[in-house]
């Protein structure tokens, strides 16, 4: 079947390119992007340095491609979860649990996404920063929507709360090990619990300024 | 007064050494530790490269000294706040508001503390990691104490909650600018509010598993 053979010939370079990117993730994670050479990536794949240029053009291209891939996948996962029916509080839960789980499932790639993007050239760095801002905007909007519907405490600053929540999530890659006692789904669920408790407001449980009495110690 | 003169002669190198460390903080922050040379630090201080070795012995020494300084100061600030009278919830509030404020007040130094410590040699890196663990242990203990006294929800995992809270705080340096609209004390207070809401439990407001109904969307 010649058609199939042709197709497999077309697929082969793409498969090989995927292997090169996966190898680069491992090496960047282990050595750091700055200290990694194209030779290191070739060694990790097990091909000659000369051959690797068939699949990639430069170290920065590899980094940029990894960052685009991880962002596309993470953002799609989160956007799909948030698009399900629900009120803003349920959507915030979906956002946090899904993104926290994704971070725990991909600590190496998220570490590169959240840290090594600084090594990109200006244009490409700005593009990644713009894409990272999409998570912040989505969460900020959900918090505002929750306030409009009386579900999120009105005294919360959506922008500051977003930064705090993204900080919780964006540091998971620094400590999470898939071989440890905790499953990624559990992390997502616990983080979502904490965030919902921190944001949720109901007339029964919330008295405006109910926390200010405790503030005296720290001021 | 010869005694005074002698004293000022003794003080002069120490003052100069402080200037060298401050200059190093600025250069590490702007260029990154790996990309910084001793020459860059000398240029920033405005002395000759040869003269700088009178104050420091190597770039890694400078980094280690900066990390020790920032840790000593941050830890003392937090420990003093937590040592004040109060129940565990009040102490958690003091811990979070004080450490978040410190992070916002010193974004350049905290960035180096939280990121560039990776560039140290093994022994020194381990020492910094041990010192960073002291914050985690202190907070974990306060959360456990709060649970023992019925103030913190019993279904919270103290270790995981600590990692989440430290993630919130340890990313402030990435976005906080002292020239922006927010004051560091306000950041500390808002972060502490969110953490207390996320952790605090009272028989009136807490029904065990009250959040699980919302979890269905994300699972």
Image (spheres, coloured by chain):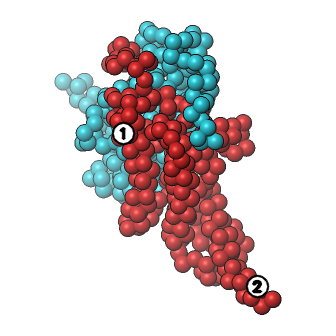
Chain colours: A red, B cyan
Pick whichever, A105 or B49, lies toward us: A105
Q: Along the polypeptide, which appears first: circle 1 or circle 2?
A: 2
Q: Is residue A121 visible?
A: yes
At a point 51% along the width and 72% down the height, the residue shown is A61
Pointer 1 chain? A
Q: Is residue B124 visible?
A: no
Quarter of the C terminus of chain B within the rendering: top right
Residue B37 spot, x, y in % from top left: 41, 58
**Which residue is denoted by mark 2 in the rendering?**
A4
At a point 50% along the width and 31% down the height, the residue shown is A196
- On screen, residue A100 versus residue B104, left or right, reads right
- Number of other residues with Cα within 10 Å of mark 2, as a class: few under 14, some 14 to 19, many 20 or more: few
Residue B30 spot, x, y in % from top left: 36, 53
Which of the 4 quarters of the picture holds residue A50? bottom right
- Mark 1 lies on a secondary structure that is helix
Q: Which mark is residue B59?
A: none
Q: Residue furthest left?
A: B1
């Amino acid at each position: 079947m010649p058609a199939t053979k042709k197709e497999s010939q077309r697929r082969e370079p793409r498969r090989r390119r995927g292997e090169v990117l996966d190898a680069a993730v491992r090496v960047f994670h282990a050595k750091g992007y700055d200290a990694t050479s194209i030779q290191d990536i070739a060694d990790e794949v097990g091909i000659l340095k000369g051959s690797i240029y068939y699949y990639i053009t430069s170290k920065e291209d590899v980094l940029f491609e990894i960052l685009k891939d991880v962002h596309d996948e993470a953002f799609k996962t989160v956007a799909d979860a948030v698009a399900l029916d629900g009120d803003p509080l349920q959507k915030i839960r979906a956002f946090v649990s899904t993104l926290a789980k994704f971070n725990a499932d991909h600590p190496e790639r998220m570490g590169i996404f959240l840290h090594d993007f600084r090594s990109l050239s200006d244009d490409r760095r700005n593009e990644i920063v713009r894409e990272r801002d999409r998570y912040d905007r989505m969460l900020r909007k959900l918090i505002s929507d929750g306030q409009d519907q009386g579900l999120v405490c009105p005294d919360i600053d959506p922008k500051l709360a977003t930064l705090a929540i993204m900080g919780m999530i964006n540091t998971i890659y620094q400590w999470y090990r898939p071989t440890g006692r905790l499953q990624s789904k559990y992390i997502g669920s616990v983080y979502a619990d904490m965030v919902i408790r921190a944001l949720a407001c109901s007339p029964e449980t919330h008295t405006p300024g109910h926390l200010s009495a405790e503030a005296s110690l720290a001021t």
